[in-house]
Image: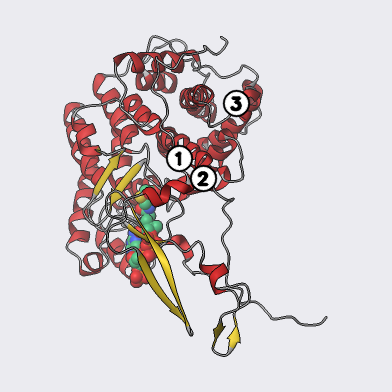
Amino acid sequence: MPPRRMNNHILPRPRRALRPEDEMAVDQKEIKKATLTIGERILELPLITGTEGELGIDIRKLRPETDGIMVNGHPVKGGVITYDPGYKNTGACISQITYINGEEGIMRYRGYNIDELALKQYRFIDVAMLIIFGELPNTTERENFRELLTNFELVDEGMRKFFDSLPPNADPMAILSAAIQCSSLYNPELRAIDPADDEDFTLAAAKLLSKVRTIAAFSYKYSIGQPIMYPNPELDYCSNFLHMMFSIPNKMHIASNMAVDALNLFLMLHADHEQNCSTSTVRMVGSTKANLFDSVSSGISSLSGPLHGGANVEVIKLLQRVNSKETTIEQLIDDAKNKKIRLPGFGHRIYKNYDPRAKIIKQTVHKLLQEFNQEDPLLEIAYTLEEIALTDDYFKAKKLYPNVDFYSGLMLRAIGIPLNMFTVMFAISRMAGWIAQWREEMLADPAIQRPRQIYTGPVERKI
Ligand code: CMC
């Protein structure tokens, strides 16, 4: 079906990202400058304040303004740079999408607390629209966007050759990353969208959000050698995904409302998380003016790592090892304290308090299992592990709390999602955030992202 053209009244207009010249319009309170002394040079650097009072030192002029200054009797060639491996203290952009206060365990999409969005039972599509377009949709906007998602839910039949070429048991996450790029080759217009054009962008966003779900389910079906199931246009986003995952040609799977609600919640809670590693990857690739599909495909690869989206798989494997008596909780805690392992599902770069997503998921897993009349021995092990860790001095001193991945795998297990699809589920959800963040990066018109380094290799030598 050809893409349906839209007028601007039926969908929200995506919110314009801040441009560099807007930065100075951000409220600056009394203190406007930081003072930095390097050798004999005193520099005044402007401060940038965010709407929640976050404060940043604007170092954009640091290098040119320190070019040639004398330090320890030597001129600094080119100027001084900052050193911050892992970017623990570095703000790479100004963003209007997600706010996190890691000290207090707060997370908001476009100003709305995720607890409230979860409590009011918003659906993933509402939240994806909020993140991408800047506002929660009204009924007409939601219905129009749903119609677009339905129109775009198929992938080109030519993609079957791509899937057919894969080895058996191929990792669905690797398939997803390659297949997203491959799918854009069948829609070349998507590889050249103008991010400033609301209509182009909205169509691309809808195609990506819709197709990622189909491709994810197809990846699973191919990985287990079952025939693929085509999407059903009568079903909503989550029911349709569960149908494509679990129906077989001679037996339709009808997902329960509880499973659909839980999946909606899972997708909603993972939809964006400001400048995490995969989102920063998407923005970095996008800063080269790479197209949306190539940029998010890199994001999927970044998300796959066990320190990032892959952590919920590691949590389940670890709980299974305890359950099969291969190890004990005490042993795991000792190994974590002795730096033999990093306890998956614990600790976070931003949260130094309970991850608010983990709190919601923990409550939901318990209810879900009760309502399904199921028992999962891994849940009891997780509770005990959490209890012991939270009272342990090492974990307390380092402020290591359960993060979203600690309970999310248990939630996916309760819905029936297989282990090798856990990170793929995260990617389906995070697609909303990547799309919004890619556009924000493109419209801010920044310089190509290109960090510097402190070189510590050999000085010039002769062969
Ligand atoms: N188990 C044991 N010790 C830990 C852990 C852990 N899970 N996480 C951090 N630490 C220790 C770490 O060894 C370090 O100790 P020291 O001060 O003695 O060197 C201290 O805590 C600070 O750690 P860090 O490396 O500075 O923290 P980071 O911000 O660089 O890393 C993290 C954050 C999430 C990568 C890390 O906590 C970790 O590896 N956690 C386990 C993997 C995990 O659950 N990842 C999912 C993150 S949430 C979903 C997502 O965003 O993708």
Q: Which residue does the numbered mark 2 point to in the structure image?
A: 283
Amino acid carrying label 3: it is Leu
Q: Earlier in the sequence, mark 1 or mark 3?
A: 3
Q: Residues within 10 Å of mark 1 (few under 14, many from 20)?
A: many
Whether 67 is drawn above or below 298: the answer is below
Across and down, in percent, residue 343 comes to 33, 58
Residue annotated with mark 1: 437
Q: Cα distance, mark 3 to mark 2?
A: 18 Å
Rendering quadrant holding ligand 1: bottom left
**In the drawing, does residue 309 fall left or right of residue 361?**
right
Q: Secondary structure at mark 3?
A: helix
Figure quadrant of residue 291: top right
- Badge 1 or badge 2: first in the primary sequence: 2
Judged left or right of residue 326, residue 197 is: right
Is the residue marked by circle 3 packed among few (<14), some (14-19), or many (20+) residues within 10 Å? many
Can residue 147 be seen in the rendering of this structure? yes
Compared across the picture, whether 139 is left or right of 181 comes to: left
